[in-house]
Amino acid sequence: MENQKIEELLAILDLPEDEQAIFLKNHFTKLYFNSDEWPYWYGVCHILHSGTPSEQRDILAIIAFQLRDELHNPIGAMSWDIACWEVWKYEKKRQDSNILERKHLSRETLERYCHQWTSFWAEPIHWIIIALIAKLLAKED
């Protein structure tokens, strides 16, 4: 998948946690600044910027699940699954894994590994990036 915006979102995973928090604060500030939801997101952005690491992780989890719940059903499985696949592949490359090059593994097996990773090992930032990519993909359709 060669989409510059998706590549930019994936690159956020390479940033240190404090820079990820700054990106998210800026992203959600721009997104919700002029909406009725701003008071809620102002509090979220404040914690992302100046909260303790524990508070920041908690807020990331809340954002991740809220985005998932908002985006998954309206978008449909295809955009969500493609976004999961993109983030999983990116993480495997970051880990220097050769799993994608193993010829004996079927696409079905790789997709099962992707879904297992997404379900059990992905962190909140991964879920957020998955949701943002799924949203981009839905706009392209």
Image (tube, rainbow, N blue to C red):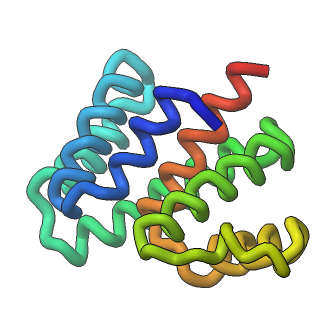
- 91 vs 141, left or right, is left
Q: Quadrant of the C terminus?
A: top right
Furthest residue in direction left, as rendered: 50
Using the rendered view, name the quadrant where residue 117 is placed.
Answer: bottom right
Q: Nearer the viewer, residue 25 or 34?
A: 25
Coordinates of residue 100 in the picture (x, y in percent): 67, 68
Image location (x, y in percent) of residue 136? 61, 29
Name of the residue lying farthest toward the top: 34
Q: Is residue 128 above or below residue 108?
A: above
The x and y percentages for residue 71 are 68, 42
**132 with respect to 20 (left or right):** right
Rendered residue at 48%/65% (across/down):
93
Residue 3 x/y as whole percent: 56, 28
Residue in view at x 51 percent, y 58 percent: 90
Is 138 positioned to the left or the right of 9 in the image?
Answer: right
Q: Residue at x 35, y 30 (%)?
A: 38
Viewer-proximal residue among 116 and 25:
116
Identify the image quadrant of residue 102.
Answer: bottom right
- Report how many numbered discs are placed on residues in the image: 0
Residue 104, picture quadrant:
bottom right
Quadrant location of the N terminus in the rendered image: top right
Is 8 left or right of 6, judged from the image as shown? left
Residue at 44% x, 47% y is: 10
